[in-house]
Image: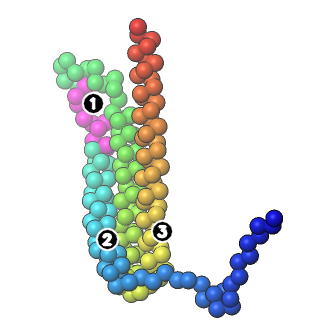
Amino acid sequence: MDNNIEQTTTFEEQSNPPQLVVTENMRSYLYDMAGWTKFLGIVGFIFSGLMVLVALSMGAMFSTISQMPGMEMYSAMGGGVLTFILLLYALLFLYPSLMLFSYSVKAKQGVLYADQLSLETGIRKLKSFFKFYGIMMIIVIALYLLIFLFAIVGGMAGR
């Protein structure tokens, strides 16, 4: 038996593809979301800036601590390594904040002025935000699994 299923479309269906309709409630939700994502983006910028300030002060702090009596061991830790790690964290925190802020600006513009391109750009930024967090979550879970496996192997080797 031949199971070929033929799809037939009329000329009207080809010339008028189905379109997504954005209702007034949806526009209201997008506008409200844009306000909150702008707030979260700005808070993220502030925390990223604070992390950069803390990272840049680590070198001076470690050199001062290492000169104190009984604290010489902390000079071996190296403020440079901690500075690099904190700068990396600040950068990793800055990117999603930028995506949230960009979404906010573009979504608000798209909703207020019925600008399809701005709304599309905003939603693309929001997609990038979630994709970034998804990738980071996969990395964190993989690191936790590695730590767990090393702990098991270390525990068995210690017996």
Q: Position of residue 158 (x, y in %)?
A: 41, 10
Distance from disc 2 to disc 1, alpha carbons, whole Å, reads 46 Å
Q: What span is colored magenta in the figure? A: 55-66
Q: Which mark is residue 124?
A: 3
Which residue is painted at 47% across and 49% down in the image?
135
Which residue is painted at 66% across and 86% down in the image?
14
Quick one: 6 or 113, which is closer to the camera? 6
- Determine which quarter of the picture holds residue 150: top left
Position of residue 68 in the picture relative to residue 120 (left or right): left
Q: Is residue 155 above or below residue 47?
A: above
Residue occupied by mark 2: 33
The answer to whether residue 102 of the structure is visible from this angle is yes
Residue 11 drawn in magenta: no
Quick one: 53 or 109, which is closer to the camera? 109
- Determine which quarter of the picture holds residue 44: bottom left
Helix, strand or loop at mark 1:
helix
Q: Residue furthest right?
A: 1
Helix, strand or loop at mark 2:
helix
Mark 1 is surrounded, within 10 Å at the Cα level, by few (under 14), some (14 to 19) or many (20 or more) other residues, namely: some
Q: Which mark is residue 63?
A: 1
Specify the quadrant that holds the N terminus: bottom right
Distance from disc 1 to disc 3, alpha carbons, whole Å, reads 45 Å
Marks 2 & 1, CB-CB < 8 Å contact: no
Label 2 vs label 1, nearer the camera: 2
Which residue is painted at 36% across and 52% down in the image?
93
The amino acid sitting under disc 1 is Ser
Q: Position of residue 159 (x, y in %)?
A: 41, 8
The amino acid sitting under disc 3 is Arg
Tell me the colour scheme of the image: rainbow
